[in-house]
């Protein structure tokens, strides 16, 4: 399949899955219970689930290697999942497999500590790991009961409800590096009661005001862009997010009167904000409507 795609431009085969937590959960459960490739080549082969940019479609690719996904265009998706079967880290180091302490089957809260073969679902934004879920191990290696299905359903429900968590938003906006996000996610995993935004803020990587803006404004824009259409545009949003000052916006507006540049271009040229942040704001936050006003009055 990979060779046909590379040399003959044949698209990799995939199946369209209904974009709902229940449908996706059922599809994953069915795959991990019958796939021979995931079973025989643990932590090497995996399935892939991609979510379209407009959050309207889900496509499921079976039997790819993890390396291929991350090295190909597939790994450039901003919202995708890998599904694999894996052992815990301690199994290879213990000579007697029956002497390994196992997580109790009903202890789904600690499913990530499963040592024997079990499904692992990871969500990525490009090369950055966003979230991870372990389906708790089972003595018969059949993951069909409520203790297997319900936690996975809850995980998929949470992920699909917020296709762009705060960490992903900050990464896309150029306000956080992938290394910082990885470190924050690892730290959050050890402190389940702490929100990711708090971890990022405590490190001083992003200001509390900026994080709060992302939570309050960006997610609302995804849900109801029309409600924000009459709100302030680019300059005001950047001020509200604590990324620039009103004085800088006023100066940029003055400069715009004698140039053909947009407000965003002027702000970037001064080094007050990056072009990546401007592009992010234009995509997720600002709403531009046709206007008969002179171009100088349009903030974006």
Image (cartoon, helix red, strand yellow):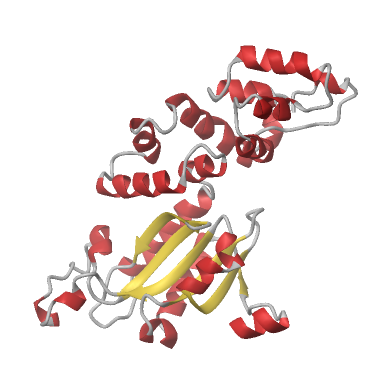
The image shows residue 15, relative to residue 178, as above or below, that is below
Which of the 4 image quadrants contains residue 74? bottom right
Looking at the picture, tell me which residue is in the foreground, 24 or 233. Answer: 233
Which residue is depicted at the point 44% across and 27% down? 207
Instruction: Give residue 105's position: percent from left, percent from top.
Output: 22, 69
Check the image and name the residue furthest to the right: 292
The image shows residue 177, relative to residue 47, as above or below, that is above
Which of the 4 image quadrants contains residue 274? top right
Quadrant placement of the C terminus: top right
Instruction: Give residue 284's position: percent from left, percent from top.
Output: 64, 39
Judge left or right: residue 192 versus residue 24: left
Which residue is depicted at the point 65% across and 36% down? 275
Instruction: Give residue 78's position: percent from left, percent from top.
Output: 57, 55
Which residue is depicted at the point 72% across and 33% down? 287
Judge left or right: residue 180 versus residue 283: left
Looking at the picture, tell me which residue is in the foreground, 67 or 145. Answer: 67
Residue 209 in view of the camera: yes
Quadrant placement of the N terminus: bottom right
Residue 1 in view of the camera: no
């Amino acid at each position: 399949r990979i060779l046909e795609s590379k040399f003959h431009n044949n698209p990799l085969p995939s199946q369209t899955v209904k974009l709902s937590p229940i449908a996706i959960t059922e599809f994953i459960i069915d795959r991990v219970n019958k796939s021979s490739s995931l079973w025989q080549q643990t932590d090497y082969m995996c399935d892939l689930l991609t979510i379209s940019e407009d959050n309207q479609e889900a496509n499921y690719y079976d039997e790819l290697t993890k390396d291929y996904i991350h090295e190909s265009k597939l790994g450039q998706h901003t919202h995708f999942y890998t599904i694999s079967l894996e052992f815990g880290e301690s199994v290879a180091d213990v000579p007697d497999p029956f002497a390994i302490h196992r997580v109790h089957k009903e202890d789904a809260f600690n499913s990530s500590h499963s040592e024997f073969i079990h499904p692992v679902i990871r969500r990525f934004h490009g090369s950055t790991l966003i979230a991870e879920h372990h389906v708790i191990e089972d003595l018969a290696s059949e993951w069909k009961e409520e203790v297997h299905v319900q936690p996975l359903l809850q995980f998929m429900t949470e992920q699909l409800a917020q296709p762009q968590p705060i960490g992903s938003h900050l990464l896309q906006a150029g306000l956080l590096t992938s290394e910082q996000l990885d470190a924050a996610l690892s730290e959050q995993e050890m402190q389940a009661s702490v929100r990711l935004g708090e971890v990022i803020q405590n490190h001083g990587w992003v200001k509390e005001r900026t994080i709060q803006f992302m939570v309050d404004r960006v997610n609302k824009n995804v849900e109801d862009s029309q409600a924000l259409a009459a709100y302030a545009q680019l300059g005001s949003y950047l001020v509200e997010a604590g990324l620039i000052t009103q004085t800088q916006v006023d100066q940029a507006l003055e400069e715009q009167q004698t140039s053909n540049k947009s407000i965003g271009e002027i702000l970037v040229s001064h080094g007050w904000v990056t072009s990546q942040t401007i592009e992010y704001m234009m995509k997720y936050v600002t709403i531009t409507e046709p206007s008969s006003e002179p171009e100088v009055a349009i903030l974006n």
